[in-house]
Amino acid sequence: MSWSIHGNGKTISPGEVVAPDERLHWPQTISIGAQHILAMFGSSILVPTLTGFPVTTTLLFTGLATIIFLLMTKNKVPSYLGSSFALIAPVISTTQSHSMAGALGGIVMTGALLFVVGLIVQVTGTAWIHTLMPPVVMGTIVALIGLNLASATLAPMTDFPLTTFLTVIFTVVATVAFKGLLGRLSILVGLVLGYLLALVQGQVDFSAVAKADWVGLPQFTTPTFHLDTALMFLPAVFVLIAENIGHVRTVGVMTGRDLSKFNGRALMADGAGTVLAGLGGGSATTTYAENIGVMAASRVYSTAAYWVAAIVAMALAFLPKFGALVGTIPVGVIGGLGIVLYGMIGIVGARLWIEAKVDFGNPVNLMTAGTGLIIAIAVTSDITFGQIQLGGIALGSIATLVVFHLMSLVAKLRGFDPAEVSKQS
């Protein structure tokens, strides 16, 4: 919990960076912390807005999860743990079939499993993860989560087309029109401009804001647990694993340090934060790529700045009027941001294929990806198997894993290397 002062504490020399265990003087550190709050804010409040969770409760648990992460990684891995988009679909589905408490139970189970995975990784390393989920599998699971969520944007496009589509335009233009921090806050820019457009059209209702108190406790909810929700939430664990390991690797490259020994701790910390959030009524958490941009621009990787961001986020949780104001975001604005974000999730999966140079000339890869994606896109409501109900994401993920490993097994039994099936058949 101590940081050495970098240089004179006020400036950073060319070619240098402020390391995780260093900091600038507190005024500069607080300024960087404020930038991290802005970077995570748009996405972190959008998740509870989409799922119907209390915004202030979610903010409280993102701050707590960030502190847990910093402590468990020994203050060596700078990261903010914001709301995870990977669990939006199972949360919405479970809320509809059971209740918000049932969805929280799914979040707790997800976090517990992630913690166990982190414990295993800390002891054995990550090689087994790459065997279970090679790039074609991981990319497909990430992509199908985004594509399955596409149907949620239909109602806003139908009911509020002008607000929805202009919010999309505002967001994508802001990404390339602005430089520096503002360009990385395109989600927040799109939200604000879309909100103003909806306000002009009379689509904003402030009645809840007038009734809300200025200061008060967040709304807490106790989870309930249902067996049929477990498989719905399982695929999200794969995404959280990829996000955490990818974040640790990226920060290691940017700081010039080998942080791979913290992979297990990062997974355990995110799992613990997600369990805590689920127990109290908040959204699941994950390491935020949005904040990597702030570090790259500022060249400040100090974990002290993340302590500042976490504490401020927790303070906002005790302002009910602020939460009520966020709750006035119109459906059209949410739908427009959903189009952008869900699309980005889908394409991130494709990026994983590209970066790993997945060969789709190989029928094992082609059928693995194709089967999983089509099932996830086609299944927009739960399908019942006896006492178990599975949604498109769960079914698509299961199909992806089964198809890949089944085809690979058969290929090996025939004496072929699965990676060379296209050349042998």
Image (tube, rainbow, N blue to C red):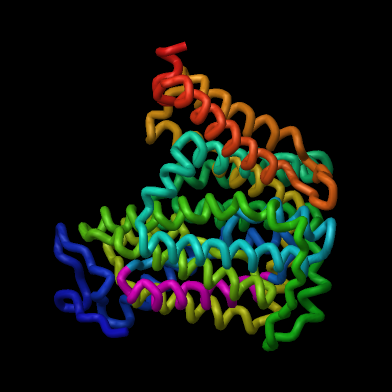
Picture coordinates of residue 155, whole percent (x, y): 81, 43
Instruction: Give the x, y percent position of residue 324.
Output: 73, 73
The verdict on residue 63 being magenta is: yes
**Relative height, residue 74 to residue 357 (above, below):** below
Number of marks present in the image shown:
0
Which corner quadrant of the image does residue 267 belong to?
bottom left
- Asked whether residue 50 is drawn in magenta, I would say no
Does 85 sit above or below residue 102? above
**Quadrant of the rendering where the N terminus is positioned:** bottom left
Q: Which residue sits at x=73%, y=63%?
A: 103
Front residue (pair 226, 223): 226
Q: Is residue 63 above or below residue 243?
A: below
With 262 as the anchor, is 141 left or right in this view?
right
Q: Inspect this view and state whether residue 199 appears.
A: no
**Region in magenta:** 55-76
Q: Position of residue 340 (x, y in %)?
A: 60, 43
Which residue is found at the position 52% from the left and 78% from the top?
Answer: 64
Residue 42's spot in the image, x, y percent? Answer: 57, 60
Q: Tell me the residue at 44%/66% (across/down).
A: 119
* Secondary structure, magenta segment, majority class: helix
Query: In the shown orientation, is residue 251 left or right of residue 363?
Result: left
Quadrant hosting residue 255: bottom left
**Between residues 76 and 364, which one lies in front from this camera angle?**
364
